[in-house]
Image (cartoon, rainbow, N blue to C red):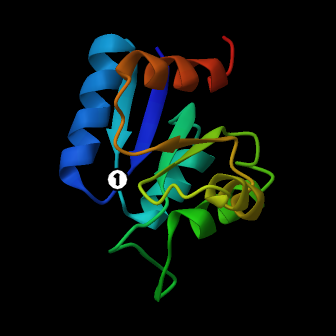
Amino acid sequence: MKTVLIVEDDPVNARVFSKILTKRGGLDVKHTENVDEVIKIARSREADLILMDVSLARSVYEGKAIDGIKITQILKGDPQTAQLPIILVTAHAMAGDREDFLAQSGADDYISKPVIDHQQFVDKIKSLLPEE
């Protein structure tokens, strides 16, 4: 079974995403906003895809506040984790933002919050999951 790592600082959003992915998607989920843990999980291949919240309010890495864009850059810049699909999740979806976020971060795709179409959400994630 495929595992999605949810990197999200809002427990309500994390719960909603978890429920959609497990119930509707038949996927396993992990959740953390701890950056060291995210990197550890990515490097040890414990997740097949990361859902990355762009605006992480409380996440810190090497003593500095860090957002989802920066974490994605770290993962995409590391040969060990560069192949791991990352989908950015953001509520700040102005026209043009999406392209900027994708270009800046190197992420594979983008989902806007709130997630209204649950099936579309699951389909998008499944389309980026590596084949067995």
Quadrant of the rendered image containing residue 117 = top left
Residue depicted at 18% across the width and 47% down the height: 12
Answer with left or right where residue 28 lies relative to residue 75: left
Residue 49 position by quadrant: top right
Which residue is at a point 25% across and 56% down the rendered structure image?
A: 10
Q: Secondary structure at mark 1?
A: loop
Residue that numbered label 1 is attached to: 32
Question: Foreground: 97 or 85?
Answer: 97
* In the depicted structure, whether residue 108 falls above or below residue 29: below
The residue shown at (31%, 34%) is 17
> What is the x, y in percent for residue 54?
49, 61
- Taking depth in this image into account, of 68 and 33 the one nearest to the observer is 68
Return the residue found at the far front: 95
Q: Is 43 or 5 nearer to us in this picture?
A: 5
Crowding at mark 1 (Cα within 10 Å: few <14, some 14-19, many 20+) = some
User: Is the residue 3 above or below the residue 107 in the image?
Assistant: above
Could you tell me which quadrant the C terminus lies in? top right
108 on left or right of 1: right
Residue 47 on image: x %, y %: 52, 35
Q: Residue furthest bottom?
A: 63
Which residue occupies 45% across, 20% down?
122
4 displayed left or right of 12: right
Query: Hey, what amino acid is under mark 1?
Result: Thr
